[in-house]
Amino acid sequence: MSASGDNFECGHSLEELSIYLDTGEFSDPGHLTECPECQSGLAALRRLAALGDELVSADIAAAGSGTDDWMQSILDNLRLELRPGRDIPVRPDTPGDILTETEGSISALIRSAADSLPGTAAGKCRLDGDVSTPGSPITVRVDVAVVFGHPLEERADALRRGIAATLARHTELNIAAIDVTVADVLEPGFPGPAAGPARPSESSEEKP
Amino acid sequence: MNQSLLPGDTTPAGLAAALRDVILDVDGVAEVFPARPLWQNIAGAARSAVTGEPLPVVQVEFDGEAVDVLTRIGVSTALPAPAVARSVAAAIREHLGSRTATVRVQLVQVR
């Protein structure tokens, strides 16, 4: 049995989690205490809600309606990433022991690092490379949306440093590069990327 | 198959319950999640519903003298996650004593 459609492997969906945050209603409340993917989803949705609050306080509530392209893109990526994914090996002290981290847990960690920066929300978070083979070079690719008024280059540099430090502490991955792309700038009257001209974008890559 | 080399309750369920406490005592461990997601363990869930016994959080399987242990854990960011995983494996081995064992630790949450 495997996950299908928009559901996580546990059978629940991001939509159910969103309704739970809005209403407190969930078909199987006990499940939320024992499912790491759903817990990560709730955490990500709460951080998104906090960003929405910032948009409202900046008097650009229209950009945070939840139906904008940028928000839809973030939610689409969340659906993909809130799955365990590949196993990332951790060196055991005793030969024969099998220690791993799920790719989903590390994606959530990266997302958390991005979301923790004021006015920033992570979109796509990807680990490119053979994460299941120790020592293989891995490229981290992160797309973020940044609220207008925050310096883009400074934000990208801070995020890259933060992700590098986080991954060095919590994984044994060989990080070859961290590619941060500011995919959206959320500004007053911003109608969404599909309706307007090309948005400001910055892509940068360097060894951590 | 049950063995009697371990202290306390040596049934798989008893050992699983004891190991859960051992794992939670390790610095940096925030949570122990069910070793098998519910959808992977429908039969076990049905049996649990009939017997009233909760599903063991840590998976313990005996194979003769050997034991296989699988746990899925969430860790805090206070300590490096790989070090916590190794500490968990060591704590499990210490609890199992000299018994031949395979220990599998899967980190499913770091926050």
Image: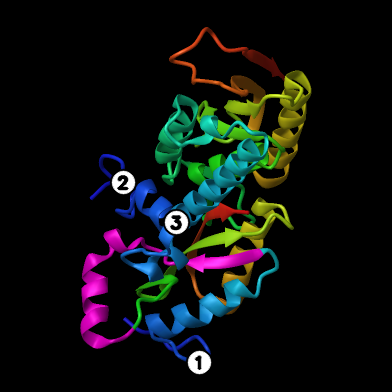
Q: Secondary structure at mark 3?
A: helix
Where is residue A31? Give x, y as percent: 39, 66
| Quadrant housing the C terminus of chain B | bottom right
Is residue B8 part of the magenta span, yes or no?
no
Residue A22 got which mark?
A: 3
Residue nearest the observer in this picture, B30 or B86: B30
Q: Which residues are magenta?
A: B29-53
Host chain of mark 2: A
Name which quarter of the figure residue B97 lies in: bottom right
Residue positioned most to the bottom: B8
Residue nearest the observer in this picture, B20 or A155: A155
**Residue at the (28%, 87%) spot, across then down:** B52
Earlier along the polypeptide chain: callout 3 or callout 2? 2
**Is A189 positioned to the left or the right of A3 in the image?**
right
Q: Which residue is mark 2?
A: A7
Host chain of mark 3: A
Q: Which amino acid lies under the numbered mark 2 shown in the image of this protein?
A: Asn
Q: Which residue is mark 1?
A: B8
- The CA span between labels 3 and 2 is 19 Å
Q: Secondary structure at mark 1?
A: loop
| Residue A125 seen by the camera | no
| Quadrant housing the N terminus of chain B | bottom left
